[in-house]
Amino acid sequence: MIPHYWSKAKRSLARRDPVLASVIRAHPSVALRSRGDAFQTLARSIVGQQISVKAADSVWRRFSESVVVVQPAMVLETGALRLRECGLSQRKVEYLIDLAGHFASGAVDPAGWTVLDDEIVIEQLTRVRGVGRWTAEMVLIFGLLRPNVLPLDDLGLQRAVSLRYFAGRRVSVRTIRRLALNWEPWRSVATWYLWRSLDPVPVEY
């Protein structure tokens, strides 16, 4: 599912920001897509923490094959030992089992997120072990398709801003936040296109 606001956001960003206009023109046929499954988005984000995209894809493939269906009950049924055999660290196994437990018990309920603003969803998610702000922001972008998320801790965003706007010079979070004022209310879309400027193949969570 492509966000309903995507075309409007593209046009708005391209008018305001020449750098983004160039990136958008270079990637005319790709767009953010949601899997529509908050648990899978969170699980995939945990799997991908602190490893390369290639390594994360490999581990995720083995994880998906092991649990058969990426649902809370199936992760709990698979158990820690088999999850470790997928190439997951012990800590990530603990995080995934804790996450599955929160979903299975109803302590985390995505159905209620639709009426909550971004910061409240982030606050709820970060109560789960292994779910930091970055992971919660990936859920907002890829799971809920929220249009105005700015993941300041994301290394890809930091690198893209450095390369595209500051000739490779290191930039501060404060500088990125200030630059992103021009992207409101489409900061998720701007971020997604800046990721594309580094890697044309869309990452999905």
Image (spheres, rainbow, N blue to C red):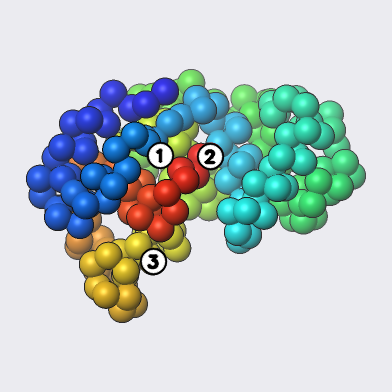
**Circle 2 — which element?**
loop
Residue depicted at x 27% and y 75%: 167
Q: Which residue is mark 1?
A: 141
Residue 128 visible from this viewpoint: no
Residue at (51, 48) in percent of width and height: 135
**Drawn side of residue 174 relative to residue 36, left or right:** left
Front residue of 193 and 72:
193
Residue 69 position within the rendered picture, expressed as x and y whole percent measured from the top left: 73, 25
SS under mark 1: helix
**x%, y% of residue 141?**
40, 39
| Residue that badge 3 annotates | 159
Query: How far apart are the two marked residues, 3 and 2, measured between alpha carbons?
Result: 20 Å
Residue at numbered disc 2: 205
Q: Quadrant of residue 18?
A: bottom left
Mark 3 closeness class: few <14, some 14–19, many ≥20 residues within 10 Å = some
Q: Residue 162 appears at what percent x and percent y?
A: 31, 70
